[in-house]
Amino acid sequence: MTESEINTILDKIRMEVRTKTGKNIDDFKAAFLERRIRYRMEINGIVNFDEYLKLLSTNLEEANNLYLAFSINVTQFFRDPHVWEKLEKEIIPNLINKSKVHTVYVWSCGCATGEEPYSVSITLNEALKSRDVKYEIFANDINLDAISRAKKGIYRDANLANINTERRVKYFQKLEYDQYQIKSNISNQIKYENIDMMRIAEKKFHMIFCRNVLIYYDKQRYMEIFKKFADSLTENGILILGQNESMFGTIGNKLFSTLYPKERIYQKREE
Ligand SMILES: C[S@@+](CC[C@H](N)C(=O)[O-])C[C@H]1O[C@@H](n2cnc3c(N)ncnc32)[C@H](O)[C@@H]1O
C-alpha cells in the first residue's frame, strides 16, 4: 500500500469511528493512530486495513474497542517526584499567599485510574491543613473503565512505590491481600467525569494538570488545546505538563510563560 492509500483508509477509519461512536479520533498523531489500528487488527486476526475497515463498518463493539485503544492509562502516584516537590514548596504556597484564594480549584485532565488526582489531593490536604483554605479537584478521562477504577480508589502495594510509610498509614486503608484504598477525606475532594477534555466548559481553575496526555496528539492541535487550558484557568493560573511534553515551538508560548522548564510548569500570561 502506498502512503497516500494508507492515509485515505485512515481517514475512512476516523470517519467510521466518528459515525459509529460519536467520538473523535481526528486529533491523534497519525503514527499513533496507525499503531493502535494495527494493534486492534492483530487482536482480530486481520492483516490488512481494508478488511479492518469492513469489520469496523459492521461492528459497533469494534468501533468502541478501537476508540478505547487510544486511551493509554499508564500512571503513578507522585509521578516524577521533583515536580511534586516544586508544587509543594513553590507553586502552592505562592498561590495561597499571593492570590489569597478561599478555595483552590484544580483540574486533573486525563486522570486515568486516579493516581494523579489523589496525589494532588494529598499534596493540597497537607499544604492547606493549617489554613482556612479549601480545595476541590475535577478529574476527567475519556476511558470509562479507568474512571470507575479511579472512583474505587483501590491500589496494590506495587502501585504505592512513591508513597512513603507515613502517607501510606495516614491516607490509605489496608484491605485484604496487598490492596489499599484511599481514605474518604482525600477522595471526597474529587469529582470524576468520563468526558473528553475539549468538552469541559468550566473556567475557574487555579491549576491544570495535563500530564502525559498531549504526547499522543498531533502538534497541529496544540493551539486549540492550549487555548482551551488558557480559557479554563484563572488569571496567572498554572499549567503542568508531562516530562516529555513542552510548549517549545508551539502557540503555547504566546499564552503561557515558562515558570520551571525542567518540571514543565507554566503560568498563564496576563491578557
Ligand atoms: C498516560 S495517561 C496519563 C495519566 C496521568 N495524567 C499521568 O500523567 O500519570 C493518559 C490518559 O489521558 C486520557 N486521555 C487521552 N485523551 C483524552 C482526552 N481528549 N480527554 C480526556 N482524557 C484523555 C487517556 O484515556 C489516558 O487515561
Image (cartoon, rainbow, N blue to C red):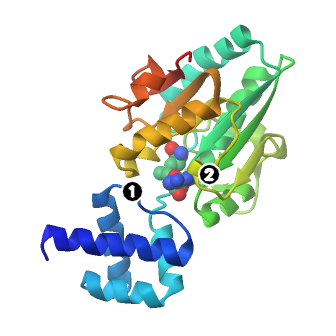
* Residue under pointer 1: 28
Count of marks overlaid on the render = 2
Please determine whether, in this image, residue 45 is positioned above or below residue 101. Answer: below
Judge from the rendering whether residue 39 lies leftward or rightward of residue 68; answer left or right.
left
Helix, strand or loop at mark 1: loop
- Name the residue at the right extreme: 132
Please name the residue shown 30% across and 30% down the image.
Answer: 249
| Marking on residue 199 | 2
Please name the residue shown 24% across and 68% down the image.
Answer: 7
Amino acid carrying mark 1 in the image:
Phe
Q: Distance between the residues labelled 1 and 2?
A: 16 Å
Displayed quadrant of residue 97? top right
Q: Is residue 212 visible?
A: yes
Judge from the rendering whether residue 83 lies leftward or rightward of residue 11; answer left or right.
right
Judge from the rendering whether residue 140 lies leftward or rightward of residue 250; answer left or right.
right
Amino acid carrying mark 2 in the image:
Arg
* Of the two numbered discs 1 and 2 in the rendering, the one whose residue sits closer to the viewer: 2
